[in-house]
Image (cartoon, rainbow, N blue to C red):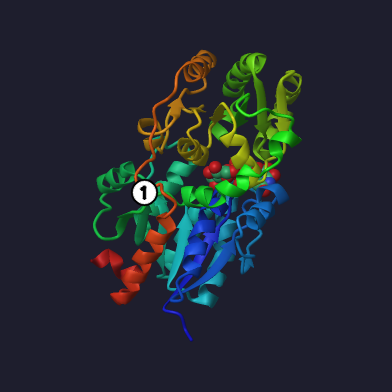
Amino acid sequence: MKKALKIIHVVGARPNFVKIASILRACRQAPEIESLLVHTGQHYSENMSRTFFEALEIPVPNVNLEVGSGSHAQQTAEIMKRFEPVVTESNPDAVLVVGDVNSTIACTLVAKKLGIGVIHVEAGLRSFDRSMPEEINRILTDAISDILFVTEPSGLVNLEREGIAGPRVHFVGNVMIDTLEYHRGKAADSRILCELDLQPGKYVVVTLHRPSNVDEHEAMVRILDALAEIQKKTNVVFPMHPRTVENLTSSGLISDIESLPNMLITEPLAYIDFLKLMSESKLVMTDSGGIQEETTILGIPCLTVRENTERPVTVSEGTNILVGTDTNRILEGYRESMDMTIPHSRPKFWDGKASQRIVSILLRSIMEGRKLADVRAD
Ligand code: UD1
């Protein structure tokens, strides 16, 4: 029997896997929806891709475009070239994209030019910093998407300012938190603290991968100076993204950081282990978007080493403090979050049910007999 709604779900990079896991799980509960999964292959290393599929119970992709790494233009163009025949052959009713990575914009462009409706999950976030590749991806994806699912109130305001409003925009909450809530129990049993010889509440977790930090030598030196001070007071664990390894190695900074006595550098960790590591830490320092959101729900202080965030609710309601990359500001933020408890609450709809809301809205649009690509005309 032909299903009422055939959706191609697109994933490419690590944070996409975390988001799609809960969306696919919710879609499996809806017999009206047929889901095909396309992995662009933007992230391909074992510990950046396959381990996430297993841990998050994501089905093996129907298609892997295997694009791998490259410049932005090469990567985006390659995804587009390889995705187009997949869409033409499978003729879906919609393409669903998540987040803001190159795979998101590449597949959105392909679908729209073939007249296929695009559903964007995590729409409306804005850092107002156009030097960030993700900001460009976000603005362009939102401008041409047909249904936009928003994680926090700022998303609604930003979209409205760009002339995107009305029945195609829905505030549903955060699918990344759905996945966190689903796996929290399992994470409690992770043995990662024993494996890394860490005591609960007695270490700081660091992740860095943004080009504005790890591709910029001076910013990196300022951050490493702060880390050198912090590790004098407490153990620091730094699961290192491949981009960061590459840059620290070519700039020669890797030996400086490796020589710090209380600094532990690891490979990128599996999802469940990383969740456990964050949950039991005394502080997380990061430039990731998703980790700002996860620490807000875990109630763990988060120092974001960026000047801005596209996720302001993590500052106004969560545990996030923006400290930029100045050594002294980072150290001040560290002291502040050690000395006092940051008041925080759970942002609206970050309750583990965002994917269910998304599926209900999609089913309603089928019942109303609307083609997704026509929603714009409402
Ligand atoms: C990408 C996303 C970023 C997201 C991040 C999560 C864009 C523009 N950026 O950044 O928004 O926060 O993913 O990790 O889409 N590499 C490997 N193995 C892999 C993947 C990458 O070794 O599996 C190395 C390659 O040397 C590559 C570099 O990491 O050149 C960067 O990868 P890329 O996908 O270009 O961007 P990210 O920095 O990971």
Q: Quadrant of residue 211?
A: top right
Residue at image location 44% in from the left, 26% down from the top: 321
Q: Quadrant of residue 203?
A: top right
Residue at image location 58% in from the left, 54% down from the top: 12
Residue at image location 53% in from the left, 37% down from the top: 288
Q: Is residue 354 left or right of residue 69?
A: left
Percent from the top left, x then y, of residue 96?
46, 62
Q: In the image, is residue 293 above or below residue 106?
A: above
Percent from the top left, x then y, of residue 31?
46, 76
Foreground of the two, 65 or 261: 261
Residue ID for mark 1: 349
In this rendering, the count of numbered labels is: 1
Foreground of the two, 174 or 146: 174
Q: In the rendered image, is residue 248 in sight?
A: yes
Q: In the rendered image, is residue 101 in sight?
A: no
The kind of residue on which mark 1 rests is Phe
Q: Is residue 152 left or right of residue 337?
A: left
Percent from the top left, x then y, of residue 41?
63, 56
Q: Quadrant of ligand 1?
A: top right
The quadrant of the rendering that contains the C terminus is bottom left
Does label 1 point to a residue whose CB lies under 8 Å from ligand 1? no
Q: Is residue 2 left or right of residue 377?
A: right
Q: In the image, is residue 26 above or below residue 179?
A: below
Residue at image location 54% in from the left, 77% down from the top: 89
Q: As drawn, which residue projects farthest toward the bottom?
A: 1
Q: Secondary structure at mark 1?
A: loop
